[in-house]
Amino acid sequence: MDLPADLQLRLRTALLAAADWFVTSQVRTEKPHWAADEGRFIYTLYLKHDRPVRGLSWTQGRGIMVTLAAWELTGRPEYLACARLAGEYIKSLQIYDCADDPRRQYAIREEVPTSDKSYPRDALEAALGFLFLFRATGERDYLRRVEHFASWYERNAWHPDGWPRGGVSLVDPAKDSGPGAFYQAVAGLLFVNLYRATGHQAYLRNLRPLVDGVSRHFRADGAMIDEYNEGHHSKDGVVQNDDGTMVTMLAAHRVTGDATYLDACLRYGDWILANQKLPLPTISGLPSICCFLIELSAASGQTKYRDWAVTALVQHTLPLQVPAGVHPLATGAFRGEDEPTEYYGPAGSAKTDFVTTRVTCYAALACAKLLGIMGPYYGADGWELNRKTGDR
């Protein structure tokens, strides 16, 4: 992209520092101090504590996206090795010993290998991690695991009302959740990329129901609304972090050619440019928006979306990256906890007293997209690798 050299250097530095955070903070074990959570990333870290909250299924998937994007940009083997190790932890979450129980077989557990539930929206990000490792390595075990998870999803994730559940109990159907929030539509990214990986049209059969279900979340002026009003997704009923929903709609446009999907994305993009006031109270929302707008710019050929994203990212998100010397487990991560801070730190803690995978992933991927590493990582295109043979 035609960005000034100094800006490209700043974006590259930010991306690689974030990738280095995933590398250096990842759980590793050596004899005789073995641990079952080897490969696990950080979910959130209160900067005045030494002990982080370790990651869930989706945290692993997103960390894989960032480290593979850094690997594509630089060719450095430590990023690919980090992504592989993260995948090993996901393997420990996926169930393969319950062939007589379709509720459990091939599920990806939510937090740890003993969890009794799976949240489909979170688990599909772990599955995307596997799929992107297949893209990077060609190792078919990763693809096999994703296809098995997709079969579990189709059996168990759909609510009779026609929308994916928020949660699935692995032990008691009575504990299953009802239909989840709008961002369940991101399952479409899993099916689009499975189609790209295999060529099997059957994976697209659920795409339209997922993407079309988002249409009821648009106001007439193009804004996206959210009746759940969840803290790390929306504020006062207006979506701030769409969690990949609109990129999924762009991907649907790419594979189906349906112009109504692109039109909806353009209306939403125009609403953002005209109405979105910064900074957002939902800290993860801005880099998430930036990822979408950069993708929208590529899909539409209109640079105004990318230009807005560049300005917003530089002014409001990049300053949140933690420099060396603040905390040994935080260097390169981005500040911002959009869940209630008392979950993970003292009551009354500020959002910026934490670093999180949620903000770090979106910020790093926005940097990668601006550097030309679009990829399928929260992206509408890019199944072909853009890997370099050496550092640049």
Image (cartoon, rainbow, N blue to C red):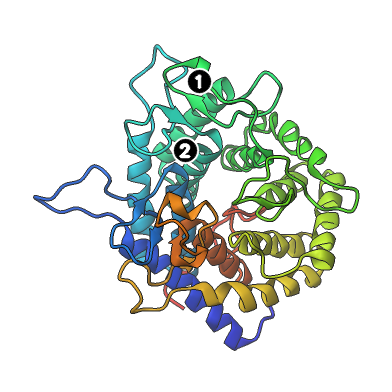
**Residue type for callout 2:** Leu
Q: Does any portion of residue 74 appear in the rendered image? A: no
Q: Position of residue 239 (x, y in %)?
A: 71, 51
Callout 1: SS: helix
Q: Position of residue 266 (x, y in %)?
A: 83, 57
The residue beneath circle 2 is: 143
Q: Which mark is residue 12?
A: none
Report the mark closest to the observer, 2 or 1.
Answer: 1
Of all residues shown, which one is farthest toward the left?
32
Answer with mark 2 or mark 1, whichever residue precedes in sequence: 2
The residue beneath circle 1 is: 175
Q: Does any portion of residue 316 appear in the rendered image? A: yes
Of the pair 340 and 141, the residue shown nearer to us: 340
The residue depicted at 64 percent of the width and 50 percent of the height is 233
The residue depicted at 73 percent of the width and 40 percent of the height is 227
C-alpha separation, residue under disc 2 versus residue under disc 1: 30 Å
**Residue type for callout 1:** Lys
Judged left or right of residue 168, residue 45 is: left
Judged left or right of residue 84, residue 239 is: right
